[in-house]
Amino acid sequence: MLVTHVRVTTTMNTEDGHVIDVRTCTAPTEKQHMIYHNLHIKHTPLGRKYLKSSVKRKDVVPKNEVQNS
């Protein structure tokens, strides 16, 4: 029943070549929400988390170096 309530990571590249990861929980279904309520726990137990890596990715081309075709 709770297997579909998952944690998702969205990854974005910045113009300066860094990587930002945003971690969030999916929205629970009505049945899942009722289970969490009956157990007296939050329906989104983990909050949103933002991570910016300090290591630059080599495969990211800075915006000013992109060539128009």
Image (spheres, rainbow, N blue to C red):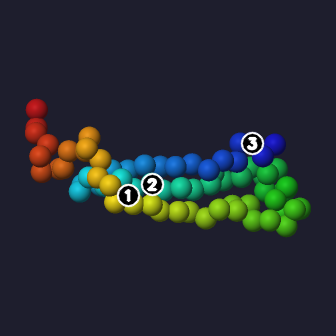
The alpha-carbon separation of the residues under discs 3 and 1 comes to 29 Å
Q: Does label 3 or label 2 sit earlier along the sequence?
A: 3
Please state which amino acid type lies under the numbered disc 3: Val
Label tally: 3
10 left or right of 14 in image: right
17 left or right of 39 in image: left
Residue at image mark 1: 53
Residue at image mark 2: 21
57 left or right of 39 in image: left
Other residues around mark 3 within 10 Å, as few (<14) / some (14–19) / many (≥20): few
Please tell me in which quadrant of the rendered image residue 33 appears. bottom right
Please tell me in which quadrant of the rendered image residue 66 appears. top left
Other residues around mark 1 within 10 Å, as few (<14) / some (14–19) / many (≥20): few
For residue 40, above or below residue 58: below
Q: Residue at x 81, y 43 (%)?
A: 1
Q: Residue at x 38, y 50 (%)?
A: 12
Other residues around mark 2 within 10 Å, as few (<14) / some (14–19) / many (≥20): some
Residue 2 location (% of width, % of height): 78, 46
Please state which amino acid type lies under the numbered disc 2: Asp
The alpha-carbon separation of the residues under discs 2 and 1 comes to 8 Å
Q: Nearer the viewer, mark 3 or mark 1?
A: 1
For residue 7, above or below residue 42: above
**Disc 2, disc 1: CB below 8 Å?**
yes
The alpha-carbon separation of the residues under discs 3 and 2 comes to 23 Å
Provide the secondary structure element on which disc 1 rests. loop
Q: Nearer the viewer, mark 2 or mark 1?
A: 1
Q: Quadrant of the C terminus?
A: top left
